Image: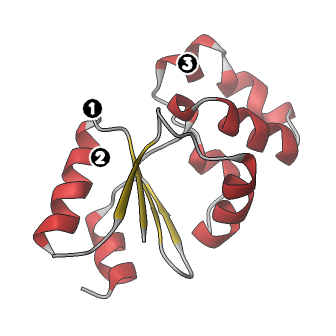
Amino acid sequence: MLFVEYPKCTTCKKAKKFLDDHKVKYTARDIKAENPTAEEIAAWYPQSGKDLKAFFNTSGMIYREQQLKDKLPNLSEEEKVALLASNGMLVKRPILVLKDKVLVGFKEAEWIEALKL
């Protein structure tokens, strides 16, 4: 199980504590040091059951600076994937990659169900 996080993010800290409290084994990966690749994002988003837009950190500075709210609707899927792969700070976090499912963001009830806790 892969836990993709930004260590300074408070939501990531909550998610990590949740995993640790439930004794869930995972491999942590710093999203800023090792950004998800285009191949990973292209594989993860269908497994998440969410739209690709859900992978964007819409509250982040880079998202706002680049005015992506206005630009995203006009981009192709490939362009969105490439944009996400270009900068880890554009990617919503944490991401928990399970064998058959990918969780984006931390919603405790969703994680409990997915992890069968």
Image quarter for residue 11? Answer: top left
Q: Are marks 1 and 3 in contact (CB under 8 Å)?
A: no
Residue bearing mark 2: 12
User: Which class describes the residues within 10 Å of circle 2: few (<14), some (14-19), or many (20+)?
Assistant: many
Image quarter for residue 115? Answer: bottom left
Q: Are marks 1 and 2 in contact (CB under 8 Å)?
A: yes
**Residue 101, percent across and down?**
54, 76
The residue positioned farthest toward the left in the image shown: 21
Residue bearing mark 3: 62
Residue bearing mark 1: 8
Q: Residue at x 85, y 35 (%)?
A: 75
Q: Viewed as shown, does residue 26 lie left or right of 104?
A: left
Q: What whole-number distance in Å separates the C-alpha atoms at marks 1 and 3?
A: 16 Å
SS class, disc 3: helix
Callout 2, which amino acid? Cys
**Residue 88, percent across and down?**
54, 34
Establish if 100 lies above or below 106: below
Q: Quadrant of the N terminus?
A: bottom left
State which tag comes first along the sequence, 2 or 3: 2
